[in-house]
Amino acid sequence: VNQLQRDMDNSNILVICAALTALCKVVTAEMIPALLQHVIKLMDHDQPIVRKKVVMALMRFWQLMPESVNDHIALFRKALCDKDPSVM
């Protein structure tokens, strides 16, 4: 969990994308509270590929523990209205 958090705080886009991709594959319900705020913070990233992977991670969180993202439904709406169509 600590390494995923550090990778999501990295300035390199490739490292961030790799962390978000790995997160979608290895996350468990117990890990979600520790990672949720790091993922939400990346929703405002200037690169569309990062925002797309954030949406994928939030969907995975929702699949595992729907109550974890109930307070953040506005982020899904924001992603639907993103200026880059690949984020949707």
Image: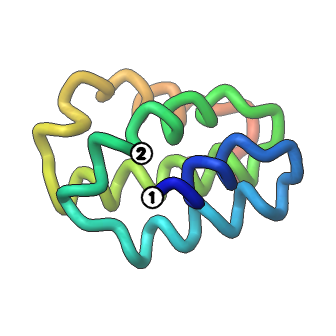
Classify residue 16 by image quadrant. bottom right
Q: Which residue is drawn at 49% across and 49% down?
A: 55
Marks 1 and 2, how far apart at CA: 7 Å
Q: Where is residue 75 in the image (x, y as percent from the top left)?
A: 43, 28
What residue lies at 64% left-to-right and 32% top-to-bottom?
82
Relative to 36, say whether 72 is above or below.
above
Q: In this orientation, does residue 80 appear?
A: no
Residue placed under numbered mark 1 in the picture: 1
Please give the label number shown on residue 9. Answer: none
Q: Depth check: 4 or 17 in front? A: 4
Q: Residue at x 14, y 52 (%)?
A: 65
The kind of secondary structure element at disc 2 is helix
**Would you say 11 lies left or right of 30 here?**
right
Tell me whether circle 1 and circle 2 mark residues in contact (CB < 8 Å).
yes
* 72 displayed left or right of 6: left
Local packing at callout 1 (Cα closer than 10 Å; few below 14, some 14-19, many 20+) is few
Name the kind of residue labelled 2 in the image. Leu
- Most extreme residue toward the right, as rendered? 12
Specify the color scheme: rainbow
Quadrant for residue 42, please give it.
top right
Which of 10 and 44 lies nearest the eye of the viewer? 10
Q: Dividing the image into 4 quarters, which one contains the N terminus?
A: bottom left
> Looking at the picture, does residue 48 appear above or below residue 40?
below
Residue 40 in view (yes/no): yes
Q: Is mark 1 on a helix, strand or loop?
A: loop
Which amino acid lies under the numbered mark 1 shown in the image of this protein?
Answer: Val
> Mark 1 or mark 2, which has the lower sequence index?
1
Residue at the front extreme of this rendering: 2
Query: At 86% across and 43% down in the image, what residue appears?
Result: 11
Label 2 crowd (10 A; few <14 / some 14-19 / many >=20): some
For label 2, the residue is 35
